[in-house]
Amino acid sequence: MSGTTTTAPGANSSERGQKPGISKAAQTEAIKVSRLASLKSTAITVVNLAAFFTLWELVARAELLNPLFFPQASDIFSAMWTGFADGTIGPQLWHSLSNLLIGLVVSALIGIPVGLLMGASRTADLVLSPYVWAMVSLPRVALIPLLILILGFGNSMQLTIIILSAVFPIMVNCMAGVKTVDPSLIRAGKVLGASRVQLYRKIVLPFTLPFVISGINQGIARGLVGMLIGELLGGSGEGLGFLLNRAGDNFDSATMYAILIILAVMSVGLVQSMNVLERRAAPWRATPRV
């Protein structure tokens, strides 16, 4: 026994920059599994889309549907390439994307704190909920004539309709998130002497974060619809909605489908960005894969 030396568990691994209790082989294996899962997801997505558009091309070439309404996939991507090359799509895409991002940021800055306040305060909920639910159920297209009358044809009207479309789903989800916090956690925090600010920072906000992300995802979808409504009916002559309307007037179905694909990529890209943000901000919410 005299010649035996003891070391604290995990000391050697800590000195080598490893987490205590986790071997280097286990960390390496976890990294490999994560990378393989990412590559697998990417491969599945690529194969899935390739098969989809290949089937589209075959059906269109066989003319099973009217070519005027169902163009070939190759014609769609050709129209997309031409639109970017000649400067038709690029500026309009930037106009729409910048408006959507600005509208979403403003909506989040308004919707998140107001929603959290409504969830935490019964008085605020009683005062604000009638107006919030009225605006949630009101069709956005019904507001266009009023907004045109007040703001005219232009960018201000388009931004306003995006904000009005996106802010209320964010608000409602944040309110619901606060109301679903486990009361036992709040009681435990109070017993341990946590202040009101600490309760919000340590319990309420982490618990509500998935609801906030879900609300923003819904806001992205609603904001995209509001953006298109504003561009289609606003008459400003800018944005992807304007290009979509012009392509329809010219019976240019290939360009119409190209713009629809761009809109889908915009929406999916923003939603996936929020999912990545959620995984980084709340890694404990990750769903295990079977």
Image: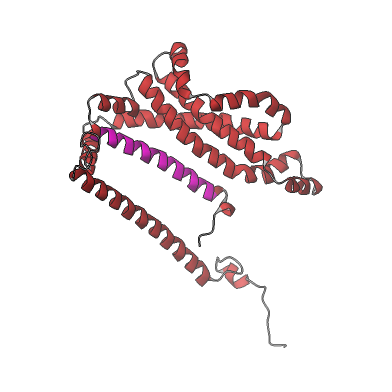
Q: Looking at the image, which residue is at 39% across and 32% down?
A: 97
Vertical side of 2 occupied by 12: above or below: above
Camera sees residue 2? yes
The image shows residue 79, relative to residue 280, as above or below, that is: above
Q: Which residues are magenta?
A: 254-280
Main secondary structure of the magenta stretch: helix
How far across and down, in percent of the image, does residue 281 sit? 56, 48
Q: Nearer the viewer, residue 107 or 226?
A: 226
> Is residue 49 depicted above or below 243 in this figure?
below
Residue at 54% across / 55% down in the picture? 287
User: Quarter holding the N terminus?
Assistant: bottom right
Give 51 or 62, whichever is nearer the viewer. 62
| Residue 43 point in image, percent of width and height | 35, 57
Q: Nearer the viewer, residue 176 or 33?
A: 176
Residue 201: x and y in percent read 67, 42
Q: Is residue 195 left or right of residue 205?
A: right
